Structures are given as C-alpha cells and as structure tokens.
Amino acid sequence: MIARFAGFTRADAIVAVLIGLLFLPRAFNLLKAAVDVLLEAAPKNVDLDEVRKHILGVPHVRDVHDLHAWTVTSGMPVLSAHIVVEDECFHDGHIPQVLDQLQTCLAGHFDVEHSTFQLEPKSHAAHEQPVHP
C-alpha cells in the first residue's frame, strides 16, 4: 500500500521482515517448550532438594528415594518417588492419609498436580537396589 501511494517499493519487504522479527522470539520459546516436553526435561521451577525436605516433613515418612520430576506437557510438571514410611502405617490405616498429605504438599508448595508415589515399609529397604539417592 505504501509502495502504491508513496512510490517506495521496498516498504512491503521491510514490513514483512519486521513482522517476521516479531514472531521470532515467540517461535523460539515455543520450540524450547516443545523440546523440553519431548525430552521430558526436569521442570526449572521444581527444586528436588526442597521437594525432598517437604516430603520428609510429612508425618510417618522416614525416607525418600528414586525422586524424579519431568515435564509431560508445557507447564505441567510430574513427579514420582519411592516413599519409605513407618511399618505400622500399613497395619493401622495411616497409608491413605500419608498419601493425601504428600499430594497436597506437592500441589500446594510446588504446583505439581500429578504425582505418583510408591509407598514402602521401612523393612522393604533390603529389597531395594542402591541405584538412585
């Protein structure tokens, strides 16, 4: 349009380049998010040391191992862990409460809405292989 009225024939090309430059940062951010999801990268806003401290603060929890976090979709961190609880919890009915407390803690403090926990009695440690801290 500028080329038609002002005679400046390169105006369309300049405007097209400017529009392309506006899209470039957004395209880069989208590509980065897609790569994080495809590689199941650890979420940047989830500090596993802090998560471990919070989990260990839940009543009846004695240890945490095989703690992993990854991204399954943009903005949705997922976490899994093996949680060692007192042996008595398996006999006196505390397991559902412990599980609820763990999931509430992660959702409230770390915005992790999807988590999977393997709850283990303390006596199960002899069956675990020491691969992950």
Image: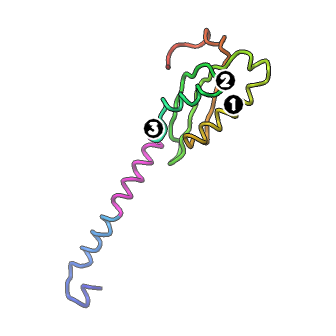
The answer to whether 131 appears left or right of 14 in the picture is right
Q: Position of residue 112 (x, y in %)?
A: 57, 41
Give the residue drawn at x 52%, y 34%. 69
Instruction: Identify residue for label 2.
Output: 119
Give the residue drawn at x 60%, y 27%. 57
Which of the 4 quarters of the picture holds residue 2? bottom left
Of the residues tagged 2 and 1, which is closer to the observer? Answer: 1
Label 2: few (<14), some (14–19) or many (≥20) C-alpha neighbours in 10 Å: some
- Under tag 1, what secondary structure? helix
Span shown in magenta:
23-44
Instruction: State which quarter of the image contains the N terminus.
Output: bottom left
Q: Magenta stretch containing residue 71, yes or no?
A: no
Any mark on residue 54, and which? none
Label 1: few (<14), some (14–19) or many (≥20) C-alpha neighbours in 10 Å: some
The span from disc 3 to disc 2 (Cα, nearest Å) is 25 Å
Of the residues tagged 3 and 2, which is closer to the observer? Answer: 2
- Under tag 2, what secondary structure? strand
The answer to whether 128 appears left or right of 100 in the picture is left
Q: Magenta stretch containing residue 25, yes or no?
A: yes
Observer-nearest of 85 and 114:
85
Any mark on residue 41, and which? 3
Q: Which amino acid, by three-letter code, is at mark 3?
A: Ala
Marks 3 and 1 close (CB-CB < 8 Å) = no
Q: Earlier in the sequence, mark 3 or mark 2?
A: 3
Any mark on residue 99, and which? 1
Q: Position of residue 52 (x, y in %)?
A: 53, 28
